[in-house]
Image (tube, coloured by chain):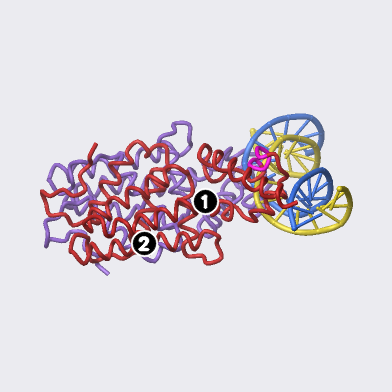
Chain colours: A red, B purple, C yellow, D blue
Amino acid sequence: MRADAEKNRSQILSVARDVATEHGADVSMRDIARRAGVGLATLLRHFPTREALFEALLCTNLDALTRRAAELETATSADEALLSWFRELVTFTQGYRGVVAMMAAAHTNPDSALYASCAAVHSAGARLLLRAQGEGTARADMNGDDLFALITALGWAVDQPSFAPRADHLVHLVTGAILTGRPGSEVGKATS
Amino acid sequence: MRADAEKNRSQILSVARDVATEHGADVSMRDIARRAGVGLATLLRHFPTREALFEALLCTNLDALTRRAAELETATSADEALLSWFRELVTFTQGYRGVVAMMAAAHTNPDSALYASCAAVHSAGARLLLRAQGEGTARADMNGDDLFALITALGWAVDQPSFAPRADHLVHLVTGAILTGRPGSEVGKATS
DNA sequence: ACCTGAACACCGTTCAAGT
DNA sequence: ACCTGAACACCGTTCAAGT
């Protein structure tokens, strides 16, 4: 009874993960259902909306990023923590094309299935920013909303095939705008 | 004979302009045809693709932006020119939600109807950047591709309803990353 | 030449019918 | 309880038929 339902659910998630990494977040739900070998209505029963499906798909990653922020908060200096976390978040979005657009839309919509995860990521970033600002290593005239906007904007940019090759450098440029490294210290210098 | 065709064409463009400013660039072509009072096939005859329609819709604006760059090149200092032009471009994209995504996709695809206009904007920006770099007021470790990426990324961000209210400030932050104003000179300082 | 309705293959949503 | 096919209202593409 419920055994096959569970099997369907995990099968759907497995297929969706593959398809999403390969073709992006705007694959047709019908296509996912087809490849998973279930009816479309079955998929919609488990995940009534695309966002619900991706919430199940990404919650592990997003929770990990939120926890990672807490780790970095105690492990390294404020500016290094912010920089590392920024990079990891952008790297994550590179894995799933199109999810950053979903996250940007979801983070202010409490009805979205992705709302909670996005809000957690958002406030984790805000904490890192605040700490760096307290140390004077991040510019004072921005807040968590700005940080989230810049991260998602950059995530969107590196989603574009034409900009993807310059991803690392674009991250370098934008983090340079956030961190107020003294000239010569070059906190955000590219390591490659 | 050709009189009604011309009438249809201008009617389609007029309606499309209204609809695009109100509902964004991903309105259905069918809907545009309906509101214009023509058959869908007629719309597709005039503009075989969505990009062709928007090329006709935006070429005036995009050409103006390209010419504006040339004006600024002789009118003001290199850094002010780059800053003003950056702002004008972002302001333009705010008027048509979703076009910046089309532009980002088109600017490396010669088959796109928007390719020429986008390439012109792209190189106009590259010229402004190069001049500022020559004067030492823009950071040397970026190029026209980076500038175009940052502009479109910012244009995408301010397209998002949640980020739109902070548009001016986000522009301030990103231009701060590009222009190497000496501390205290605050070239990119918000004027509001 | 130009326009048009209709057929086509898609999409996501909904629901009655099956076990 | 859970699954499924089918009907529905959309979408963009294509084309034969009309003037």
Q: Which residues are magenta?
A: A31-36
Q: Are marks 1 and 2 on the same chain?
A: no
Q: Secondary structure at mark 2?
A: helix
* Mark 1 or 2: the one toward you: 2
Amino acid type at circle 2 is Ala
- For mark 2, name the chain: A
The C terminus of chain A: image quadrant: top left
Above/below status of B109 relative to B51: above
- For mark 1, name the chain: B
Magenta stretch contains residue A32: yes
Q: Residue C8 location in percent, x, y?
A: 76, 35
Q: Residue at x 56, y 39 (%)?
A: A19
Which residue occupies the foreground of this view, B76 or A71?
A71
How far, Cα to Cα, is label 1 from label 2? 33 Å
Q: Residue furthest bottom?
A: B192
Q: Residue at x 16, y 51 (%)?
A: B180
**Local crowd size for mark 1, using a 10 Å CA cut-off: few (<14), some (14–19), many (≥20):** many
Q: Residue at x 72, y 50 (%)?
A: A41
Magenta stretch contains residue A33: yes
Q: Is residue A170 visible?
A: yes
Q: Circle 1 sits on which residue?
A: B25
Q: Is residue B37 visible?
A: no
Amino acid type at circle 1 is Ala
**Local crowd size for mark 2, using a 10 Å CA cut-off: few (<14), some (14–19), many (≥20):** many
Q: Residue A182 location in percent, x, y?
A: 12, 54
Q: Residue at x 16, y 61 (%)?
A: B186
Q: Main secondary structure of the magenta part?
A: helix
Q: Circle 2 sits on which residue?
A: A124
Q: Residue B93 location in percent, x, y?
A: 41, 53
